[in-house]
Image (tube, rainbow, N blue to C red):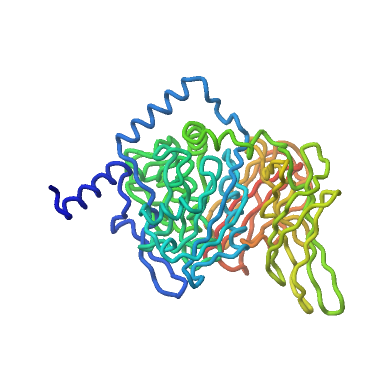
Amino acid sequence: MLNRKSTCLFLLAFVVMIFGSLSATAADLVQYTSADGQMVQGSRCDTPTPTMDDIERENQAVEDFLRSGNYSAFSKAVVNVPVAVHIVTHDNGYGNVTDTQIADQMQVLNDAYQGTPFSFTLVVTTRTANRKWSTARAGSNTANQMKAALAVDPATTLNMYFTDIGGGTLGYSYLPSQIDESSTIHGVVCAFGTVPGGNAAPYNEGDTATHEVGHYLGLMHTFNGGCNGGDQVADTEPEASAAFGCPDGRDTCAGGGPDPIHNFMDYTDDYCMYLFTAGQSTRMDQQVALYKPTLYSGNGGGTGGGDMHVDSVSVSRASKGPNVNGVGTVTVVDAGGQPVSGATVTVSYDGPSNGSASGTTGTNGSVSFNTSKVKNPSGEWCFDVTGVSHSSFAYDSIANAENRSCESGNVSRDGRVSLAQLSIEAYPNPFNPMTEIKFSLPRDGQVAIRIYDSRGALVTKLVDGFMGAGARTVNWDARGHASGIYFAQVSFGGQMEMRKLTLLK
């Protein structure tokens, strides 16, 4: 008979055999700031690493799938993934995430996955006070019990949990091939401090979720397999080990180019990671089509022009004496442009006052929201659409004409632009104090180039006029601006492309 120690060792070996290592080595540990100001050491990511046998079986399954005739590359222009966000706090409320932070996190996800087949729509937010669940370690029975109790249909919905993960782990997920699509174990778990504006600096810009969703959609770490290139993606340069901080020029493998430190699937600081490759986009499409067919074929996506979408977001203000409030109006239409009544719209707003609200569209397809009143306010109010639902219509967020608007005008559109038509790059990036914004225009026309900060506020207009076709370069001199994340937006002919910029001083 096995003694207790032998039994534990046997079970540990079994877990490693099935899922790979769930614990980080000393070289994988990171440090970040906790909500009470203390330094915490933990794993950047505890997603199980597949074994070589797992990878070989998966490669064979993908090859058979591609030969079967049941897959057509990017057959869905957009796979709109419904997202259920679960905030799990301590019993006293420690670890809470605000509605505004949730909305910001959704925006970070959609910005990061532009250019891939995937977009994300928040469909529900739940809040649960349970310290045992909140502090459960990655892959533990308690964590799985939490998921079983809270998960919304895993086959059709991405469940995203924000908790105070035990052991200091920042996040974890599972690859599509590791678990059946209907299992409640699927989903993404992130430390609550990793949301935009959270406490877990330098991992508090929302890209821990971007990274873990990459695993959920089938991506491995860029350093998987070391210099042998084990992430199964041809256009990510191999690297011997995970990169931390933002080590520009790092090159740990002979031949090829520098390590892919700016890739979302490395371990660098949030400000340093800002891209997926075309090969990663292809892999995600194949992995989800094969291992998550229900999600891939769901009603959330499509080839554009879904059942309903946001046609406009306008912002104004109303005043009575010195008391002023912002007014945001959202209009929802169907694929034919007709107003949709009875749609429930949720928004968040920021500016002189912050908050969130929900309401139902009338016969004209519109619903208006009022912010709290502020006496003699400074600055402008901005509104974000965080969700739209209807009993008879599917919400196609990628078709939205507008997602966020301020009193000064629209900030961001859906960004659905073919890079063959309009492209934008920035070099250097990160930069100090000047960067070149390079873009290519398919034809002559009116061009607007604007810089926004991480909150969506307009920083400056670089160009607003006619430009000829071809490659163009515009310089942004950021002297006088604080270090942080900015976005360059190029608008042309009804199209728009954005690029994340990192100013380091």
- Is 327 displayed left or right of 394 in the figure? right
24 relative position to 502: left or right: left
Query: Which residue in the rendered view is the most extreme toward the left?
Result: 1
Number of marks: 0
Residue 406 in view here: yes
Q: In the depicted view, which residue is nearer to us: 245 or 376?
A: 376
Residue 488: x and y in percent read 64, 54
Who is closer to the viewer here, 53 or 164? 164
Which residue is outermost to the front? 1
Between 265 and 318, the residue placed more toward the observer is 318
Residue at screen point 46% across, 46% down? 184
Q: Where residue 117 sits in the image (x, y, percent)?
A: 58, 38
- Residue 125 is left or right of residue 360, and the answer is left
The residue under the point 31% across, 45% down is 20
Q: Is residue 388 above or below residue 354?
A: above
Decide: is 71 above or below 189.
Answer: above
How far across and down, in percent of the image, does residue 332 sit?
A: 78, 47
Instruction: Judge whether residue 254 can be spotted in this image.
Output: no
Location of residue 26 in the rendering, given as x and y in whole percent from the top left corner: 28, 59
Residue depicted at x 70% and y 64%:
349
